[in-house]
Image (spheres, grey):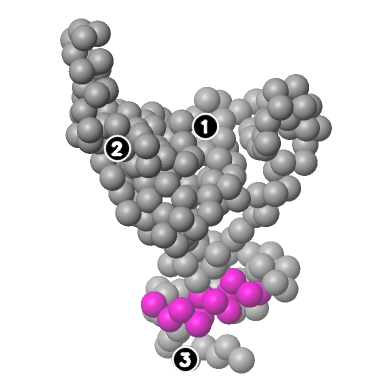
Amino acid sequence: MLRKSNTETEAGLSYSTKDESYLANVALLYYQEGLNQGQIADRLGLSRATIVNYLKEGRDRGIVDIRVNGESLRSSSIGQELRKMFDLEDVYIANSGPNSDPSSALRQTARVAALAFYNIIEPGDVIGVAWGETIKSVGENLPDRKIDSTSVCQIIGSMESDRLLSAEDCAIQIANRIGAQCYTLHSPAILSSKPLAQDLRQEETIKAQLKRLKISVL
C-alpha cells in the first residue's frame, strides 16, 4: 500500500525519485494494470506531469525494460515479397508513415535495425561495423544487452566529420552496448592514390581485421 506523509508534496515525496520500488510501482500501474497517467495521478495524489516524469525515469534507469518482439517485423507482405525476389534470408520493414520527416524516418529505421540486430547476432559472432548517420543511430537505439563472446571490428577507415561520430566511435558504441571486445582500424578511409590504397590493403593488420568478420553492419 502506498501512503503519503503529511508533508508529502510533488517536489518532496516521502518516496523520492531515488526509490526504485516507488518507480516500479508506478510502472506496474501503467504497464500491467493498464491505468492511464491521469488515473495513476488521481490514485497517488500527484499531477499527471509528475507521473509522466516517473515513467520516463523508470525507463531511463532501467527499471522498466520495454521490448518488442523483432520477429514480428519480418511478417509483412512487402518483406516476404522482397525475400522471394532477391533470395534473402530475412527482411525487416521499418514503417515510419507517409507523413514522417527524414529525421523521424531515420529514427524508426534505426529502432527496427536495433531489434533485428539482436535477432541476428549470436554469441561468439564477430561483427563488422561501418560508419554513417544510420549506423550511429542504430548504436544509439541498441539497448544495453550483453551478447557473450562477441567482437566488433571497425571495417571502414577514419573520416573527419563535424556532424557524425567517427568510424571508431560507431564501432566502440555498438561494442559497449553488447559488451563486446572492440577492434578499431587504424587507417584513413580515403587515400590520395590508387596504388597507395592497394598497398594499404596488403597490410597484415588490415587483412587480419577483415578476416575476423562473420557479420557486417553497413
Q: Residue at x 56, y 35 (%)?
A: 109
In the image, residue 199 sits, relative to residue 153, either above or below, namely: above
In the image, residue 4 sits, relative to residue 206, either above or below, namely: below
**Residue 12 seen in render:** yes
The amino acid pointed to by label 3 is Asn
Label ID, residue 106? 1
Q: Nearer the viewer, residue 18 or 69?
A: 69
Res 128 quadrant in image: top left
State which mark lies toward you, 3 or 1. 1
First-in-chain label (2 vs 3): 3
Q: Which residue is mark 2?
A: 208
Q: Which residue is mark 3?
A: 6
SS at mark 3? loop
State which mark lies toward you, 2 or 3. 2
In the image, residue 78 sits, relative to residue 13, either above or below, namely: above
The amino acid pointed to by label 2 is Ala
User: Magenta residues, as a range?
Assistant: 18-29
First-in-chain label (1 vs 2): 1
In the image, residue 3 sits, relative to residue 156, either above or below, namely: below
Q: Are marks 1 and 2 in contact (CB under 8 Å)?
A: no
Q: Residue at x 65, y 25 (%)?
A: 99
The amino acid pointed to by label 1 is Leu
Rounded to the nearest whole Å, what is the CA distance between mark 3 and mark 1?
Answer: 48 Å
State which mark lies toward you, 1 or 2. 2
Q: Residue at x 65, y 78 (%)?
A: 43
